[in-house]
Amino acid sequence: MKKILLITLSLLAAASATALDQLYIDDFSISPGETKMVEVMLDNDSAYTALQADIYLPEGLSVEQEDDDYIFSLTDRKGSDHTLASATLSSGAIRIYITSQALNTIGGNSGALFTFNITASDTFAGSKSIEMKNIIATDEDRVLHHFPNTACTVTKYEPAVVTSLMTTSCDIPQGVKVKFNVSVSPGNAENKTLAWTTSDEAIATVAPDGTIETLAMGTATITATTTDGTNLAINYVINVTQAQQSGSQGNPLDVDGDGSVTSSDVTAIYNYLLGN
């Protein structure tokens, strides 16, 4: 297999070359020990019948094999007789070569051209690169086109961790809106979205951004849950107390009852949130 690929390329090398289109892999993250499907994308303005690329994998990542052969799968962008062959080069790169005996063209102008499964070692860590070099495609007139080298960044998957920046049990006056401050870490967590729920909507509601509105006296539990599959949660038990009324409007934010909302009221409410 390797000899056939190299001979084919030596015959094509005499053709003229341009660098217009791109073969690439989007950046992704992977957990140690995980196997993940990778899509190799092709953006092309011209129509191509064949394509070659050398894939360089970093230490800690490997392509799935069967009977010592790498497993690559063409997508529905292939023509009726396109096939994909692969071989390991002396440099350690994996050379893939997509051909059509009938010179059928690859369909479409964007999207995944082929896929493969990649496995991370149990000790995979940090950030590494998968490179693709020596990317060559031929068109219907057998003209050779050189693509630019590309690389994608592969990082160790970091699940989200939720940390409260305030007490998880506090008193809040009835009829106010407050927003709980929750930290999602680490900074490169793939999904930092939280789902907010309340145990009793009659006592307190919570908006998707974590803003809580107290409606009636009583106790309710507000829960923030990660949505990245880890389902980590942090609970806030709030005791909704009687609203402080003042003036004709009965502004519940006027905690000290002096007829206006001042910094002392803000401090008092903040202390409510901290449970002091």
Image (cartoon, rainbow, N blue to C red):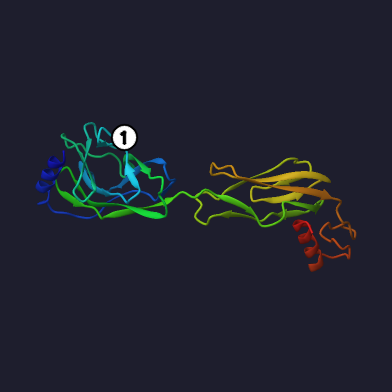
Q: Name the residue under label 1.
A: 76
Reply above or below: 228 against 80: below
- Which one is in front, 15 or 244? 244
In percent of width and height, residue 257 lies at 89, 62
In percent of width and height, residue 154 lies at 39, 51
Q: Quadrant of the C terminus?
A: bottom right
In which image quadrant can residue 51 be found?
top left
- Which one is in front, 252 or 34? 34
Label 1 is placed on what type of residue? Answer: Asp
Which residue lies at the image location 37% right of the left edge and 42% below the top edge? 119
Which residue lies at the image location 90% right of the left edge and 58% below the top edge? 248
Counting labels gives 1
- Left or right: where does residue 23 sit relative to residue 186? left
At numbered mark 1, what does the secondary structure look like: helix, strand or loop? loop
- Left or right: where does residue 116 sit relative to residue 226? left
In percent of width and height, residue 130 lies at 32, 51
Which residue lies at the image location 83% right of the left edge and 56% below the top edge? 252
In which image quadrant can residue 178 be found?
bottom right
